Image: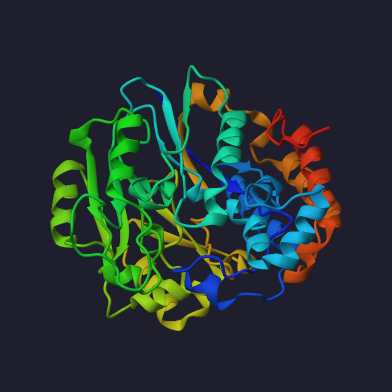
Amino acid sequence: MNAREANFDGLPGLTHHYAGLSFGNEASTRNQHQESNPRLAAQQGLLKMKALADAGFVQGVIPPHERPNVAALRQTGFTGTDAQVVEKAFRQAPQLLSAASSASAMWVANAATVSPSADSADGRVHFTVANLNNKFHRAIEAPTTGALLRAIFRDAEYFSVHDALPQVAMFGDEGAANHNRFSNGYGEQGVQLFVYGREERASGLVPARYPARQTREASEAVARLHQLDPQKTVFAQQNPAVIDQGVFHNDVIAVSNQQVLFCHQLAFLHQPELLATLREKIPGFTPVVVPDNRVSVADAVSTYLFNSQLLSKPDGKMLLVLPEEARRHPGVWRYLCDLVESGGVIDELKVFDLRESMFNGGGPACLRLRVVLNEVQQAAVNPAVIMDDRLFTTLNGWVEKHYRDRLRHEDLADPQLLTEGREALDELTRLLNLGNVYHFQQ
């Protein structure tokens, strides 16, 4: 049966702000406490979704989470009405309120790891919600992420959504941002590459400056949950040296699509051996390795060259979706133009302005969750979340109605922001036919 890759993008939430919460993500730290524009963040995301849908790609949307997360604040000792909880948190622990208000769920590449039915023994599409336990502001996402995925992929005959792995360091799981899949056709059985930063049970090279968030143990657990063929499953360690340069997830240094791996020369530990293994397992494997002397790791991180979307076109060639920052860097853009002119598989570049997301350390690839679907499975997806002219107009109107165009750190203490968010998500629930995914609903 024919299958296609669908991209489901996270919609930035109403509390999108620059808190510098993500140690290891240099853009997040660098832009801490700058004024943000939540409305523009959502509009920029919607424009990318609509452009790709208009280009013929299957495109969906994943809604934001409720923020601030009052339940998490109560769990840490704050009491009173919801408004009082927020006010007390701002006075006593403003960084905690900032974490509980983070709109980081917009980066749905970290929402889950996904395996298509062609790879799974039971013939279903499998999702494992990421526990994201390296950072508090992300670890609180898992319950709502699971509810949203089940509201979108609701038919258990075709989809299996697994809860997050145990919230302990040994099972640190960052989702699809550390996962790649290779195949000749989307509907054919493929090879899955799980990338980890450290192995709990063994000593070895680890980063010295920044944390290695993904563990091998977590990746192995996800592969078991998804019922993958061990012969078609590869585990590789990310280069600790590049983690220490701000490559906090593999999708900051590599991206794959079908038989192609687009990566930096220094992306993986023991990279020549890994490429040889992939060449043995994947017919037509095509690595596009960017030399360090053309694009340094620092330039890759600052421009998010590899945090791009690599998409297959009907003619068999591939489109690379990039942030505006890649075009503005002379050396990176010169490399990309040379790449397109070389006659290889990547023959088109498409650039989007995602400044609001980029300032917090998330590029095009961070904003999307890739899901391979055959025709029957695609028909079983909640149709209300699939991007088209109607949904684009509806969501832009919803954003214009509910989102603020400026947000500062001190605005998080405004009880009206909590009310605005709940009213907006209550309306969005009905628009997208989500059921009871937000517990505050009337």
Would residue 57 be visible to someone looking at this image? no
> Left or right of 50: which side holds 124?
left
Q: Nearer the viewer, residue 82 or 407?
A: 82
> Left or right of 229: which side holds 421?
right
Q: Residue at x 68, y 33 (%)?
A: 437
Q: Quadrant of the C terminus?
A: top right
Q: Residue furthest bottom?
A: 330
Q: Position of residue 51 (x, y in %)?
A: 62, 52
Q: Residue at x 51, y 19 (%)?
A: 156
> Left or right of 201: which side holds 218?
right
Q: Residue at x 37, y 30 (%)?
A: 187
Q: Quadrant of the N terminus?
A: top left
Q: Residue furthest top?
A: 157
Q: Nearer the viewer, residue 70 or 207?
A: 70
Q: Nearer the viewer, residue 274 or 201?
A: 201
Q: Position of residue 313 (x, y in %)?
A: 45, 47
> Left or right of 175: which side holds 237?
left
Q: Position of residue 199 (x, y in %)?
A: 25, 53
Quadrant housing residue 335: bottom left
Would residue 414 be visible to someone looking at this image? yes
